[in-house]
Amino acid sequence: MVWELTALVAGAISIVAALFLHKWVMSQANENQRMAEFSVAIQSGAAAYLKRLFQALGGLACVVAIVIFVALGWQDAVAYLLGAGCSALAAYTGMYVATRANARVAWAARTSLAKAFPVGFFAGGVMGLSVVGLALVGMTILYMIFRDASVVLGFSFGASSLALLAKAGGGIYTKTADIGADLVGKVEFNLDEDDPRNPAVIADNVGDNVGDIAGVGADIFDSYVASVVAVMLLGAALYTEQFVVFPLLLGGIGIVSSLIGMLFVRPGESNDPNKALNTGTIATTVIFAVLATITTFLIGISNPWGLIVPTIAGLLAGIVIGFTSDHFTDIDNYAVQSTADSAVTGPAILILRGFSYGLVSAVPSIIGIVVAMLVAWFSAEHFGIAGTYGVSIAAVGMLSITGMIVSADAYGPIVDNAKGCAEAGGESEETIRICDRLDAAGNTAKAITKGFAIGAAALTVLALFAAYSETVGITRIDLRTPGVVAGVLLGSIMPPLFAALTILSVGKNAFIMVEEIRRQFREIPGLIEGKVKPDSDRCVDIATKGALKELLIPGILSFAAPVAVGIILGPHALGGFLAGSIISGIIFALFMANSGGLWDNAKKFIEDGAHGGKGSEAHKAAVVGDTVGDPFKDTAGPSLNTLITVMCLSASLFGPIIAKFALFGF
Amino acid sequence: MVWELTALVAGAISIVAALFLHKWVMSQANENQRMAEFSVAIQSGAAAYLKRLFQALGGLACVVAIVIFVALGWQDAVAYLLGAGCSALAAYTGMYVATRANARVAWAARTSLAKAFPVGFFAGGVMGLSVVGLALVGMTILYMIFRDASVVLGFSFGASSLALLAKAGGGIYTKTADIGADLVGKVEFNLDEDDPRNPAVIADNVGDNVGDIAGVGADIFDSYVASVVAVMLLGAALYTEQFVVFPLLLGGIGIVSSLIGMLFVRPGESNDPNKALNTGTIATTVIFAVLATITTFLIGISNPWGLIVPTIAGLLAGIVIGFTSDHFTDIDNYAVQSTADSAVTGPAILILRGFSYGLVSAVPSIIGIVVAMLVAWFSAEHFGIAGTYGVSIAAVGMLSITGMIVSADAYGPIVDNAKGCAEAGGESEETIRICDRLDAAGNTAKAITKGFAIGAAALTVLALFAAYSETVGITRIDLRTPGVVAGVLLGSIMPPLFAALTILSVGKNAFIMVEEIRRQFREIPGLIEGKVKPDSDRCVDIATKGALKELLIPGILSFAAPVAVGIILGPHALGGFLAGSIISGIIFALFMANSGGLWDNAKKFIEDGAHGGKGSEAHKAAVVGDTVGDPFKDTAGPSLNTLITVMCLSASLFGPIIAKFALFGF
């Protein structure tokens, strides 16, 4: 009971801290009217999108809640709605403050980097702290009321369902706007990025917020909750209640560590925002490791080492995967530069290289995940704890510093938008240069988070996979049986199929967007001369409607496919299905994220002056690569983690019923 | 014994028939001197490449043979060398006649399509019949001497090792030359395909032969042998000797059916080569089904239905997957046309669409494989035969008509080359048009073979996977154990890694080739005016050396990785490793083949007049897509089947030793 209260208090502190940071950010000044207008346009565009998204998802959530109510009882239905609601609230809060912070960061950048940086970082902190706070409070309260881990599973399923659609929808939105704006604005009319004459610029900036902030917020909320739930389910199946509540306690320690760690995030004398963010991450990690070790020993749990070694193994693996994952996509690295070199032969070989290096770059991360899993498993077993429980604790360990990681990540799109504000507001070169430096640090933070998120998601789904078997009560998932092989093959095609459908959606919507932008330049007199404002609302509308419409098929597929496989082929085949989707999901998530990042940086490398710089033939080829990579890294890639999480959760939730009604028992 | 003799005689008949066809093809006339010269240049280029390839591989094979001799005894070492030798011989024979048939087809096309078609088809038949004949004779003799299925496993390993390197090497060769020739010739100098002024044209045509004929020949030889060996191993582990020899008998029936089926391949009155090839395939299928059923009942084996239903299920699945796999890549289909449509926005969205549709197109094939596997498994079990044996018999059933399928497939590059000869020889428009029509039919046959080969390889590796477990003596490969999960994750990264390395090799070599072609146009006076011949040998040399050099790392990786995983993590983890590589291997093989085909046809669709036709901006974008797709469909994609087969075979061969010396026993 003390553990639960600790978690609850820590969660509450996190929410209060988020509110405090929010108030502080809002108290910052912005006196540039044009920047304020630009910011307001983004705010209203983002709010309009989120409103329509949540309306659509709200209806869907009610339908699913009714299904859950009928199939599993009211407790799970309530938990499901609460999970979806908390996830939506965290995403909304993050986006609310982000869209208001952008102009304030730009205004502060007029003074100095040291003044602007905290505005950006603390605005990001609102989301980081909201995510962990709402998640931990939600789970703890549910568990305190029902004392049943499977009700918390409903919460997690709600959070993940919302995250999947928020992430995929946001990804489709942001890339529709981005590609549309680039193809017509940059390529056909030679406009700069964020040129206010471009009708899709507002939609593009809205996209950054709904994709990179609301989407990522919902995504990490879902991983965080899922990792805790996996431990709770395994704890309930294998051990006593102590082991069920332990991850909540770890979550509480993680929040305290993140709060302390955030105090270390200061640009300091070196004026280096990148270093500031990294210092914060490392400080949080160390503080968490120390606090978690001490606490585990103090609380008098049996086998403390069996819990602490996997926790720290997971934590270290997360950091290592995070920091190394951007190695391949780093602009100073051979992979990026040789991809850029091939731009002189045109786009084809550039694309082949980026594609190939993306695949190669998945290798170290996968080895990292395997090592983390094996270390967690065997260190746990060595100290008398079940290996599956050890792996799931490693996932929680990895995600325990989420508060800090998400804060640093959300900082990225905020300062990116700040740059857009400064340009739209006609601020000085110096201000824009400061915004650029803030932005560069944001890109690194984003790369680290990406690797971190994929590593954490991989361990989490492995834990969920184990939890599924426990929940359904199958003791093995044997690759020598035909049902499991069938399941594995069918499951493995799900992530690539989902990725393909979302990319096709982007292509389709971008097409419509391109037509609309061309129409405006053609039909609105004075637009190209900058005398008249473009009809941005129309572009926002196209992106919004397109994203929501295109979510339908992949959304249904991800919910229906596991249930269908389970009902037709039985629970063992469903286990195989989950395994297959995890395997190909991890590969495609890593490869798409890294190839996309690589092409992006190859373009930047050329823009920095290589092979003729901006405007050269090589640059045009690199722009093609970047456009191909955009939906890879911002639409399809990041949705895949959530896809496999959702499928594992839905299988665990409905597993017992599926097992009862399965047509075949392969 | 009668069964074995039947197989032996059928195999011998096949070889004699191949010799007879060879003689007939060589007796055909070609009186155009320039065509003859062009053909001779291709012959000597191809022979030079194969000679160096086989020299390099010969040395490697001896090293491996010594390792096998030390580890497993002389019988396996001899079988290994024999397998590699037979595979090389089949590939060499096919290529020998193909490079001599091209000019003869072109000369016959001066008269009529009806006269030219049989020259092309029977030349392809030489390879088709050599492949099945040599494979069946080799396996049967080995089994008759040693009466041990595991010795035949050595034969299969030899065949597959050679096939992997021949396929990947040929794939790197052909695309190095093709991309190099296109990038400089077509794009920079506006030359036509096969323009004799282009220094890389000979290398390009050599590449078609070493990649599409020698490579595919070795590839299908290896699948064919592996499928039979899987049944023999399972038969030996589970049943009596009858069940070991049964697949050899089926192979013999397949040869007889193919020989009869080939008589149905006649362009007839409709003058439609495509119809002729399809009629031959369908006739072979029907004849095989009837003969196999009758034979199975006559020979007095127990449970005939348990063998015949899986055989026919596999056969039908192969046909269905083959005929439907080209649906997505068909030029009249929505996927190709909408990909072509997106060319008007430039290459980026075209590439995204082709990529996505390639992923989507993997879905029906995977469902087809799953259904074939489940039907084979449960029909076998229903009639009292072990499910694994049923699946392996289905693979043999699928591959039983290999003789006909390979003949139709090899026809493709022969008539493609014939067109090159006709152009180089300055033949009339009408002759070139006839060659074009022959070529179009070849493309369809190639698409069918591709689907068929992947389906067959998938069932074969599933059978080999079962055979591995039996050989090593593990009763289950449980996804709930950490070693298996680690193995699955590590295995799943192998096919994408192999694909990436071979594609990077193509990019690297093409770069060197581009420089060389540019140098020649710059430094050889009179070349561009057509007064002087280019230095084609230099280009052939670059392609040859590059391909051999680049084989080293992926080659070592594919042999060493499974052994390393087995030695470090133990036999269960190695089982997981194989499963992981099968899963991602099937997905990447299907997706890469289909995306590549799609881009190719999107380009053709535009060349046929859509969106401005040849020379338009849309066409340029489509050429980029086609260049990206080239190594997808001709280098990386087709090597992946062989990669997973080699890994399964090497695991089975060395499995018992690995099990003994494994460091950990996860």
Image (cartoon, coloured by chain):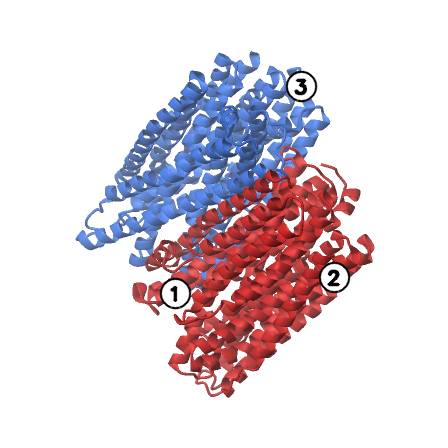
Chain colours: A blue, B red
Q: Residue at x 33, y 49 (%)?
A: A508
Label 1 is found on which chain of the structure? B
User: Both on one chain, marks 2 and 3?
Assistant: no
Q: Which residue is mark 2?
A: B141
Examine the rendering and report whether any part of residue A414 can be seen: no
Residue at numbered disc 1? B604
Mark 3, residue position: A297
Query: Residue A424 in the image: x percent, y percent?
Result: 30, 45
SS at mark 3? helix
Chain letter for mark 2: B
Give the mark toward the camera: 2 or 1. Answer: 2
Looking at the image, do the residues carrying marks 2 and 1 touch, with CB atoms under 8 Å apart? no
- Tell me residue B355's x, y (percent): 44, 53
Could you classify mark 3 by the number of other residues whose Cα lies within 10 Å: few (under 14), some (14-19), or many (20 or more)?
some
Mark whose residue sits in front, 2 or 3: 2
| Disc 2/disc 1 C-alpha distance (Å) | 48 Å
How many labels were placed on the picture? Answer: 3
